Every structure is written in C-alpha cells, then in structure tokens.
Image (tube, rainbow, N blue to C red):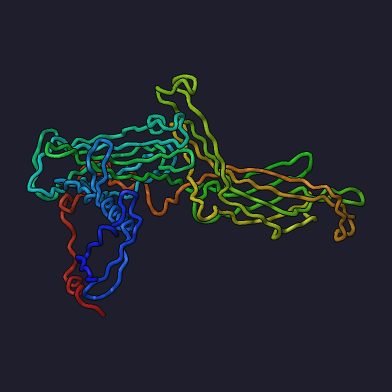
Amino acid sequence: MPSRILPFGRSHPSQRPDTKHGPSHIEHFTDLETGDHSRHSTTMDFLHFGSKEKSKEKRHTASGQITPKNKGSPRIAPAKPAKIEIQMESPPCVFYGGPNCSGALFSGQLKLIVTDTELPLTSISMDLNANTATKKPVAKDCPDCINRLTTLKSWNFITEPTTYDHGTHQFPFSYLLPGHLPATTHCSLATIEYGLQVKAVTPLTDPICHQHPLRVQRALQPPPEKQSVRIFPPTNLTVNVIHNPVIHPIGSFLVQFRMNGVVEKQQTTQTRWRIKKLDWRIDEHSRNVSPACPKHWDKVGGEGKGQQHEEMRNIGSDSIKKGWKTDFDTVGGGQIELEFPASIRPGVHPVCDVESPTGLVVWHLLIVEIIVAEEHAKNSGQKHAVPTGAARVLRTQFKIVVTERGGLGISWDQEQPPMYEDVPESPPGYLTDYLGDLPMPPDEDLDGMGTRD
C-alpha cells in the first residue's frame, strides 16, 4: 500500500485535537533537520501566552486614565534668584545677673546674596520673635493652643522698591535684649526659643525667607556660701549645713555637714545617736500653665485660664555609708562632722532655673536624708554600746539654683567706653602757661649730662 506523505507541521484531520472540549490532546512531531522529538502542550502555550499578554497590559485607574508603571524623575524646584544669611558679630547673648540686670546686647549683619544678574525687591523685613510652645496643650491638634509667638523687635531695611545687582549686600542690625526675659529653655513641659525671621519680597518669585535661631542664656554670679540650721524635735539633734546656693550643670560642689546634740548624759549612762547612712539627691521641679485659645476657652472655664501641669525628676543622687568623724566627748552634746561632694549626673541635660511670665517655672532642691540609730552606753566605757533598736530618718531640703557658667564674660554696660560727660574739657596745661623766667642749669651740669662714670 503506498504511503502518504503528510505536510510538515500539520497533523491528519482525524488526529487533530478536539478544541470544542478544551485542549486536552498532546501533539507529537519530529524535526526533520535535527531529528529531535518535542512535546508541546497547547494548554501550557495558552497559559504562557496569556501571562505575557497580561504583563504587557497597562494599569487603568477608576477614571479610565492609564498610569505608567515607572515613576518619572523627581521634580526639581526652581533655583531662587538670591539667598539670605545672618552673621552674628557680638558675643553670645548672656544675661549676667537676675531679672534686674542690664540685659544682653547683640549685633550682626544680614547678607543678601544675589545670584542672578539683578534682583528687584519690594521689601526686606526681619523680626525677632520669642516662641513659647507647650507640650501638653489644652487641644492636642490646635496650633494656637500649642504655640504663643511674641515679636520683640522688627526691622525694615528698605522703604521703597529697590533693585540689587549681582553680589553680596549687607544690612547691619543690633538690639538690646531686656534682662527680664527668660532664657532659652527646653524641658519636658514646654520650650522657650528665640529666633530671627527674615522675609524678602520680590515680584519675580515667591518671598525669600530665612530663619536664624538665637540662644539666650543667664549666668548668676556665685554668691557667698549659705549656712542653714535645721532642728529635729523631739530629739536634741541639730544639723548645720554649709553649701553653695548656686551650682552649674557641669562640675561638683562641696557640702559641709555637722550634727550636734548626739549625746544625752544621765548619772551613770548616756543615750547617743549614731549615723548609719546618709543619702542625698537633687530634684528638678517644673510647672507650666497651658493656656487655651479663644476656640477652646470652654474647656478651661473661661478666658484667661489654663491647665496646670507639674513634673519632677531626679538629676543626681548618691548614698554615703562611711567617711564621717564622730566625737561623743565634745562639749555641748557631742558632734558628727562630714564633708561630701555633690553634682548633677552627667547625661541628664538639666534645665537651668527659670521663671517666665508665660507660666513656665523650673526650680531645684537639694534633699538630704540621714538615718540615725539610738544606742545606750555607760559613761565610763563608751566602747561597749548597746543598740536600743530605735532609729529615725532625718530629712531636710535646701533650695539651690542651677545656672550657666559666666566664665570671663562681663555685662555689656561694664565694657563700654567712657561717656562724653566723663571726659575732661581740655588736656592739662603746659610750661608755656608759667609766668616768669625758668632757672637755667649751670654750664658744667650740661656738659656732664652726656658722660657716665
């Protein structure tokens, strides 16, 4: 029977798969050039082809617009025709003394750096602002309840439209900060910050703005050491403490401690107190009143009222269990002497004492706790004392002030030159004002002036 030659790549009609019921038949063919046998599944081809078509599809939004997969390059803001810088020329702003001091004088240069060929400006203004921000406001998301901005000074450097050429243009400024202002403060309840805000208006682009922070500090002169006496009834114990009332965030200070009345003698026995342990710590207290804006007056009960918040944290502590000198034979009931250093713990970032009219107050206390135990002993043999089991905790506190170090700086009014009224009207007179002839020395004396023995 003669064989039939089928066309390459096509199957016999009787062997074609039934596509009505799905591509379930597997077709076999032989490559005439290589002779390799391969199997192709129409199902896999369909799935593979469908996945390729799906990957080529573009994403459609709800509005029917096509959004590309790859995001475009970031948008670059146009370059401004000028920039502003502030260069301070005066020393740091430090108040030397309390609220009644003469203040702090600062000065500087406002630099306008024009990068274009020329720049027309309508106005250049600068404001010195004091911003008080509370961290626990009456309304959490209300910016008016959080921030209170006060403008202390304003400068207008140009009064009419002016065009500036390419280059740097300088505008000097100065101001005397009043001494009653609070220093820059950052605590857990509120912050007090100062800053210079510059705004240059030009018709070409948006206003050119610049902000420069200004740190204000206060340094108190160290006063003489303070001596305090504490009495602890019903006992006869008296504590005399000598310490420095002004301390600094860095460094230590000495505390001299003396306890009197530790011995009470009877006819044959005596009752005395012995120190077992001494603990000291420095506590930082802060209090702030959060005012309400006009929209939230109903939450605090009316206009001019606010919510008060207080916090306390420990910024230094230590425990002393030895090192004191006990003398029970001292006249007046015996005494115990001790001298120990105290300091603020490094890394706690203490806040200096401040009292602001906006409601923020920060103060510090040195707290000393002494544990004493009672014992009985005979007047003849003091070495053999018997503890009675009674003990007391003597607690006392002293107010201290934390301030910045003044260093070698002085107030601005102490370094100024003399005033005009302090200068004499004319220099002193010369010999020409002398009436009469001056006596002349002899010739021999004149000849001997140029020789030496």
Residue shown at 41% from the left, 36% from the top: 133
Q: Can residue 180 be seen from the camera position used here?
A: no
Residue 67: image location, x then y, percent: 24, 44
The correct choice, above or below, for 391 with respect to 189 in the image is below
Residue at the limit of the structure toward the bottom, as seen here: 453
219 displayed left or right of 27: right
Residue 151 quadrant: top left
Residue 418: image location, x then y, percent: 28, 45
Q: Can residue 281 be seen from the camera position used here?
A: yes
Residue shown at 21% from the left, 66% from the top: 6
Quadrant where the C terminus is found in the figure: bottom left
Residue 11: image location, x then y, percent: 25, 62
Q: Nearer the viewer, residue 233 or 343?
A: 343
Counting labels gives 0
Residue at the limit of the structure toward the right, as seen here: 268
Residue shown at 40% from the left, 25% from the top: 293
354 displayed left or right of 418: right
Q: Nearer the viewer, residue 97 or 60?
A: 60
Q: Nearer the viewer, residue 124 or 270?
A: 124
164 displayed left or right of 381: left
Q: Nearer the viewer, residue 402 or 161?
A: 161
Residue shown at 64% from the left, 56% from the top: 339
436 displayed left or right of 284: left
Quadrant where the N terminus is found in the figure: bottom left
Residue 302: image location, x then y, percent: 46, 19
The correct choice, above or below, for 2 with respect to 425 in the image is below
